[in-house]
Image: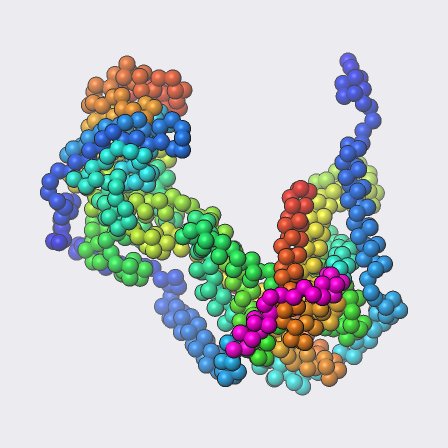
Amino acid sequence: MSSIREEFGRDEWTRFTPRQKLARWGALAFCALAIMWALTSIEVIWPWVWSAPEQIGDLFGRMYPPDPSNLATILRVLWETVNIATFATALAVLLSLPVAYIAAQNTTPNRATLWLGRLILVTSRSVNTIIWALLFVAIFGPGIVAGIVAIMFRSIGFIGKLLGEAIEEIDQRPVEALEATGASRFKVIVYAIIPQVMPTFWAVSILRWDINLRESTVLGLVGAGGIGIILQGAIDTFNWPEVATILLAIIALVVLGEIVSAFLRRRIL
Amino acid sequence: MSTAPRDTWRKPPFIANPALRWTVYLGVIGYFVWVGLTMPIDWDRVAQGITRAGRIFGGAFPPSFARSGLLIDGFLESLKIAVLATAGGVVLSIPIAFMAARNIAPLPVFYLGRAIVIVARSFHPVIVAILFVKAVGFGPFAGVLTLIVYSIGFVAKMLAERIEEIDFGQVEAMRAAGAPYLSTLFYAIFPQILPRQIGLSIYQLDSNLRASAVVGIVGAGGIGATLANAFGRYDYDFALAITIVIVAVILVSEAVSGVIRKRIQ
Amino acid sequence: MTPCRGRSMRPARNESVSMLKITDLVKRYGSGDPVLKNLDLTIEGESVVSIIGSSGAGKSTLLRCINRLVEPTSGSINLNGTELTTLRGKALRAARRKIGMVFQGFNLVDRLTVMENVQSGRLGYISTWAAVSRRYPRADIRRAYELMERVGIAHYADTRADQLSGGERQRVGVVRALMQNPDILLADEPTASLDPKTSEQIMGLLRDLAGELKLPVLINIHNVTEAKQYTDRIVGMRYGRIIFDDRPAQLDQAAMDEIYAGSPHADRTGADAAAAS
């Protein structure tokens, strides 16, 4: 019987080869260096950092107990927030359909439209809702129109991308079969492509509505309507008990939104 | 079977019960019509939007990189915020994830863990940022705190789900071999969640970088603050330059993080 | 158009016998060896013709060239006086309406009902509004029920296609093709995804329908036993050429060996059994 040494050429065991070890230590050292660099060069006033827990505790202390005296207004504005999210999602869904169509490789009419579609998706997705909101508040003035348009612009990229991928992943065989019957391009889309992407369409729309509900709560902080406006007002006037009420209302809204979207997903899909 | 040849056919409706079907249809139509008509919209102001948009875009082209020093400083600050917040968030999310994992934590701890995750996830980072700005003052520190909360919301949730899926056979095998608690943790549980945690950290660094551009708008430091200032001063050409750089950096960081995560798995 | 009643399955179609004439057909993918090499084939009347040959012999490509799902490189395909190879756009779609096709994988739209799948065979005929709103012409609905009853799936009209078994799905595929009121029916391995018993039922159905509708049927098939049993004429293909074309009785072991020579083929067992019987 041969010894382990003869058979494998070594009798010690380590988990990683030296090369792997080097890579692991290198990665770790790189992370440590990055953190050190950030820590030493970031412009913070360290005494403020040390007093931060106290300050944060103080802030929460002043929020208690929450003041519900303005609850009627808060709920009304919360409803407006829901409307912003819902309208923006509905409009974005409609507008993202043609974008998804031209951004999917197997349905786009030609190269130029494919790149146009991709450009729209990338632009829309890379710019955050809040940055869109800054722009549209400057254009349309403060209010819910800016909020709806901002959320819509961001959502088109999200929905369009996922829908476009769903179109690219469809089963091509029914498409071939319907082309063989002599159906026009439009009818092939209606009968062979749309039924196949319907589940994704609903899932993505519901998911985006849920996300938009969250996003619409902050639009007001840049003047684009919704609950953020009264949150900003309460913070600016140091009305912390009311801030607490608004925050609780936002949690309730987000949780409710998740319940509703889970219900819709179960019913529709 | 059938006596007369059938020559009519209707697609079975999506909702079988007609009363419910019409209630849903009318409800949806009613909602959009009613809300659409009663929205507080100042149409005159909106109508001016076209000319204003023209003025803004006219002012924005060509984008101005004249103050690139300011731009680079803002970006480096965003990057520092993202790095520190990711480090802090990932470290803190580990104990919270264990608390929020049903198969490991005792019930009261589990509820506490889940509550932390839900609260951290419910608030948009911008809201968290505005609170921290009030509590600890303007600047990047508020940004770091904000994104730590944001990271916990995502990383702890995903990690807790991973912990709930771990194979307990390995834990039992370790226990059967008489391994103490910490050894069990290090040999049976950590190896199972570590790859996931590294992947999540890289993903979170990428998303913190995105978010750090946004929280600056409400005063939490970084490139967002630079962007908000440029917008406030009607420097649309500089604002466009910043936006272009943000988009470019996000695309690059998305690509890099994607490549690294693919390599690791 | 007079609606047809009772057992007569004959649709209001031009009374002349269909004729498909393929001359000198070449199909080459890229710069490689041609898949079809100067192929000639004529199909006349209501016969059921099967094409046999090993995988890669070009059977599927030949069928798909006829309705132009595959673009022929050169040659001529003529159906009842219409040259198919040069058609474009509207004219091509009009020609495709008259060519029904049944597929190996059924190619149904899973999430639509059986009736919608069946009516999708009429898409080339009906208005866009009728297609989108699913308000099909009464005559089409009556015809659909007749055909569905004929193949035994009428009770599934409102069922989603993905709820059906393989044999039932292929019946939907056959009815969809027949709804086109075709001059010829192409079937590309219609039974390859089915179990033996079901596949015999489908072959029997295709043969019977060909007779009832006076419709020529061209079937690609792997299973030589079924080809001999259910078809009037067998065309054997090898490397893009037709090397056998005769009645099933003439397909002897020598012919089989020539068609399948050198190809370690899964269906050799079936082929041998057929030749031996």
**Span colored in magenta:** B51-75
Q: Name the foreground residue: A148 vs B182.
A: A148
Quadrant position of residue B187? top right
Residue depicted at x 36% and y 31%:
C28
Pick the front one: B242 or A81: B242
Residue at 82% over, 75% down = A58
Q: Position of residue A98 (x, y in %)?
A: 44, 60
Left-right relation of A92 to A243: left
Residue plotted at (78% across, 41% down): A24
Look at the image and tell me whether residue C196 can be seen.
Answer: no
Query: Residue C18's quadrant in the figure?
Result: top left
Q: Quadrant of the C terminus of chain C?
A: top left
Of the pair C212 and A108, the residue shown nearer to us: A108
Q: Is residue A225 left or right of residue B155?
A: left
Residue C171: where, in percent of width, then height?
A: 29, 42
Question: Quick check: is B69 in the magenta stretch?
Answer: yes
Figure check: B3 above or below B182 = below
